[in-house]
Image: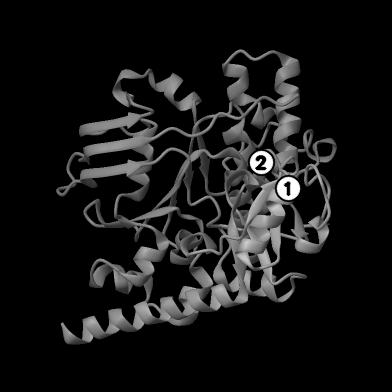
Amino acid sequence: MAEEPQHGVPIELRKVTKAFPGTGAPAVRELDLNIAAGEIVVLLGPSGCGKTTTMRMINRLIEPTSGDIMIGGENSRDIDPDRLRRHIGYVIQQAGLFPHMTVAANIAQVPKLLGWDKQRISDRVDELLTLVGLEPATFRDSYPRKLSGGQQQRVGVARALAADPPVLLMDEPFGALDPITRERLQDELLGLQDDLAKTIVFVTHDVDEALKLGDHIAVMQRPGHIVQYATPAEILTNPADDYVEQFLGGGSSMRLLRLTKVGDIDLDQVPYTTEDADAPGVLKEIERDGRGYALVLDGMRRPLRWVTQSDLEGRQGPVGEAGDPVGGTISHRMTLQDAMEALLNADNDNVPVVGRRRAYAGALSLSTLQSAIQSIKARERERRTRRNLA
């Protein structure tokens, strides 16, 4: 039986500076950054702005010149570097797999260093290959040269997750892949994160990737400082200055629609209940609400069925298995553009929105989505007006 995964821990950078000898200005200058446990934070900026240096200081591949880095409340300076790195997963561009080792041996490196027994390692390898969409029987004994670029990156992610670290560092992991594979792996990473809730620091210079993946984005500028640290929606609708706006490439309504996430807008709150709830009481709630239905959730708040007024009329005792199965859900990480397509293809007017661990977060309808789009457009017009008056 698989062990319960270890969730992420907070990371805090306090006045962190890195100056390399003979280079003049520091690569990173008095950088402050608070990363909440279980979030994806993207370091975004052009080459030379200190993104990778900042990331590599977190696992002490580079030692800070000054300042402190707190990981789970503990100063990284007080942690043995080898022990620290064994509890921080690290994924780089083109995976960085050992070519002379099989896929299974690559994934098993850190568990072996931690002294896991052979059976536990073997079970973990198979579990992780399944998790990243690679059939263990097909891939565990393969060598990296036999894999496509996308498959190698999946193995790289599996290797980084092998010892179930609370923190995952990802340095432009999808940068060398073709656009279709890259988008697929981005989607898979978001799906994994909803289940695993790791603390992920992700480096990229690609704006669309940052806006798609990040819970928060740190827009960086030379020499190694943060210009704006905010959610994707905040950065899109209210860039801090001309540098941020120019780096984003300007905002248009279509771009906002394509990159704004469902979790960034106000959702419908339809009545919801559980299977063991009293059916007459739920019926009264449905009648008070006036929409004629409620959503039945399981013990982990995952959507199960829609139950209507007619399903419950005359029913005594618990709700039980009354109603019809939920036809589909929308992830809180889905873009508004993708959500619109999902709604147009849905059987019901309202579709449940799910967050972490597929838990119910609200519902979405075309009318709610259209209202959100109008609000986004209005904010964009207001921002442009303010800019023109400045």
Can the viewer see residue 10 in this picture?
yes
Q: What's the residue at 34%, 84% (across, down)?
A: 381
Asked if 86 appears above or below 136 in the picture, the reply is above
Q: CA distance from mark 1 to mark 2?
A: 10 Å
x, y percentage for residue 166?
50, 31
x, y percentage for residue 209?
49, 61
- Quarter occupied by the C terminus: bottom left
Q: Quadrant of residue 109?
A: top right
Q: Are marks 1 and 2 in contact (CB under 8 Å)?
A: yes
Q: Which residue is denoted by mark 2 in the rendering?
A: 155
Front residue of this view, candidates 62 and 349: 349
Which is more N-terminal, label 2 or label 1?
Answer: 1
At label 1, the amino acid type is Leu
Q: What's the residue at 67%, 56% (across, down)?
A: 284
Asked if 333 appears above or below 52 in the picture, the reply is below
Q: What's the residue at 62%, 18% (across, down)?
A: 112
Front residue of this view, candidates 30 and 36: 36
Can the viewer see residue 177 in this picture?
no
- Quarter occupied by the N terminus: top right
Q: Which residue is denoted by mark 1 in the rendering?
A: 147
At label 2, the amino acid type is Val
Task: Please tell me whether mark 1 sits on a helix, a strand or a loop.
Answer: loop
Task: Please tell me whether mark 2 sits on a helix, a strand or a loop.
Answer: helix
